[in-house]
Amino acid sequence: MSFLISFEGIDGCGKSTQINLLKNELENRDISNCILREPGDTSISDKIREILLNNENNICSESETLLFLAARAQLVREKILPELEKGSLVICDRYYDSTLAYQGYGRNLDRDLINSLNQFAVNKMIPLITFILKLDPEIAYRRISKNEVDRMESGGLKFLQKVQKGYSFIAKSFPNRCYVINCKNKDKLTIHSEIMETVNKYI
């Protein structure tokens, strides 16, 4: 059993919590899995992550996009493909949908160009399942504002609202792989149960 699951959503939506719950469930079933995050999890991608998230760096939107794509290309070839070949179920905290949502919608860059560059970066490595965790941007903004924010989290509420629209477009455009999980007024275990309903169809 080897396929790719990606988790998407605006900052503060609870992706990390749900990924950890899924990982625990898979391990309880003795299912080999690998958890990865974007950008990061290779030496090159981690260096790119430091550049992207550092508040001291004034990065233009075009450079930001290309840096994310470079980190992704490295992650696919160095980690995702080898793990799939070993038979692991790969779970990625963000993947190429993030670039369309954040840079295409959040930064108002050319979406067709981003789609083309994304395909070049991932070399046809498309997730079998993409979970989009949907949360009111105002709630998400309050969550992330409680802690020190990085450069990508500092865009403000209006930025998150634009990104959320991007994810709505993505979900409608790719209904066969995208599963929108409405997180409003739900605890983490309820959300986890909804995620497992889908995952159980494939494992």
Image (cartoon, rainbow, N blue to C red):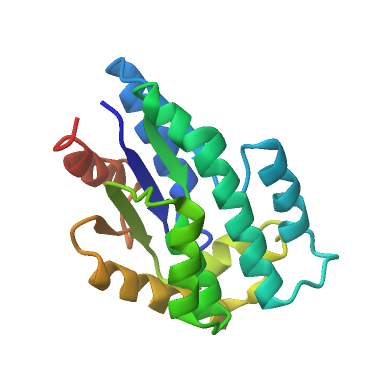
Q: Position of residue 84 (x, y in %)?
A: 38, 30
Image quadrant containing the N terminus? top left
| Left or right relative to 47: residue 138 | left
8 over 193 or under it: above or below: below
Is residue 49 in view? yes
| Left or right relative to 66: residue 58 | right
Is residue 162 in view? no
* Depth order, front residue of 81/14: 81
Q: Quadrant of residue 4?
A: top left
104 over 10 or under it: above or below: below
Q: Quadrant of residue 179?
A: bottom left
Q: Position of residue 128 (x, y in %)?
A: 27, 46
In the rendered image, the residue lying farthest to the left is: 201
In the rendered image, the residue lying farthest to the right is: 56
Q: Position of residue 53 (x, y in %)?
A: 72, 58
Residue drawn at x 59%, y 44% as measured from the top left: 74
Residue drawn at x 26%, y 58% as measured from the top left: 178
Q: Position of residue 200 (x, y in %)?
A: 17, 34
160 over 178 or under it: above or below: below
Q: How many marks?
A: 0
In the rendered image, the residue lying farthest to the top is: 30
